[in-house]
Image: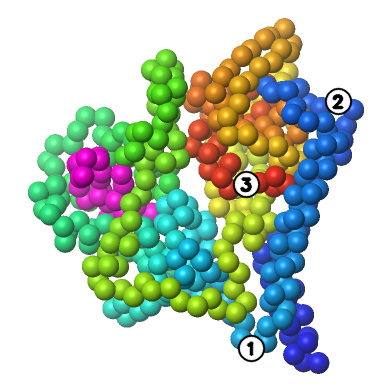
Amino acid sequence: MLVRRLITAATLILVTLFAGAGALWLRPAEARLPDADFAAPMSARAAVDVVAEAQARQEAHIAAVSQKMGLIDPTHLPLIPSVYFADTGHHLSNRSGFLNFWRANGQQLIFGLPISEELVENGRIVQYFERARFEFHPEAFGSNSQVQLGLIGTDLATHSLLSDTLVGMDDPQSEATYFPETRHTLVGIFRKYWKRHGGVAIFGFPVSEELVEDGRTVQYFERARMEWWPEDVDSFFRNQESIQGFSLTTLYEVRVSDVGRRLAAARGVNIAPVAQLPGTPIWSAAIWQRHIDVDLTAQQMVAYEGDLAVWHAPVATGRDGFNTPTGDFAIYYRVPMQDMTGSMGGETWYVPHIPWVQYIVGGVAFHGTYWHNAHGTGVRMSHGCVNLRIDDAQWLYEWADIGTTVTIHY
């Protein structure tokens, strides 16, 4: 009887941890859909059916994980939430806070996947990832500094043939951010990426200037090495940069390279795959109940996995007369690229090549924009849609799915 109770309790804990509040909703079909930049791709009734089917699949996935856990002897279950990455054959847990840190600060985009289990180096618990090394600092337990990133960019640069580029500069470049701590500068696309994705806390200070390695522009930081992939931005957006007078960035134009893997190899760290622990689910964004919150007053969007915020982005929403609707919705249709056409309120428009479109109610959608950069400024630009920067729209498209819930409010 005791074992049965423990199994039931463990199952309930898993459902609570991974499913979040579990409230999946969509505004009922209405007689008239909101006006917006796009024509609704399907009726409100059809959208409700699509969302219900997708959310049923999500619930079935969570239930399957819970059932699998319930069949395991509770004494063999992990005591701390843990997941397993089949691609690399390693676990990631919250024993030291690494799992939530990874989820909340960029996930695979910034850190890559775990390539080792937790281990001890110089008396400290660490874990290697493809692009980083996490360190547990017990002296800061419970604070934002409990998990810190190792200075692997510095380590790798120091042990490579970069001694000349590591020498600091006395005169910073014009229109560059100069860091007296390391006497190096940060400019252009690398500076934009550095600021958007965590700054000093995630990447550290620059420890080199921009340089060319193997034909690609790179820059070393205390905790990372960035690479520039200009070919990731297609010619249409490059032309729009010239027309609009500001730069556009895709999600993978700048990439954090595999310095974690390189340093692990240099230090002889064991990265061989390990067997999956009983009761640990294979990693998927769908483990947690995904939810998107849009604050029309702040002009900000936050994506959540359960109760944990995992992405923040500025937005530009509908202007007066074309106000973005408020309420509880869900993504019901998605397309990576679409032309925008419409005629409303005495206006007619045609805007081609709209990236990363996700419909949430009627013709109202999340999508990237290339014709303005007013996101988060308070200037509302759209006919009802939620405008995002292209890189944020791409991240949201890759992370979300049909049935992902959305709340829009003031």
Label 2 Cα crowd, 10 Å radius (few <14 / some 14-19 / many 20+): few
- The answer to whether 355 is drawn above or below residue 147 in the figure is above
Would you identify the image quadrant in which residue 209 lies?
Answer: top left
Q: In front: 2, or 64? A: 64
- Name the residue at 27% across, 64% down: 263
Would you identify the image quadrant in which residue 353 lies?
Answer: top right
Foreground: disc 2 or disc 3: 3
User: Could you tell me which secondary element the residue under label 1 belongs to?
Assistant: helix
The type of residue carrying mark 3 is Ala
Which quadrant, please, contains the C terminus?
top right
Q: Report the side of 139 relative to 168 (left or right).
A: right
Q: Residue 75, labelled with which disc? A: 1
Q: Look at mark 3 in the image and give the residue it sits on.
A: 400
Can I make out residue 175 in this image? yes
- Distance between the Cα atoms at labels 2 and 1? 55 Å
Say which label, 2 or 1, has the lower sequence index: 2
Does the CB distance between marks 3 and 1 fall below 8 Å? no
User: Could you tell me which secondary element the residue under label 2 belongs to?
Assistant: loop
Residue 396, position as x, y percentages in the image: 57, 42
Q: Which residues are magenta?
A: 201-227
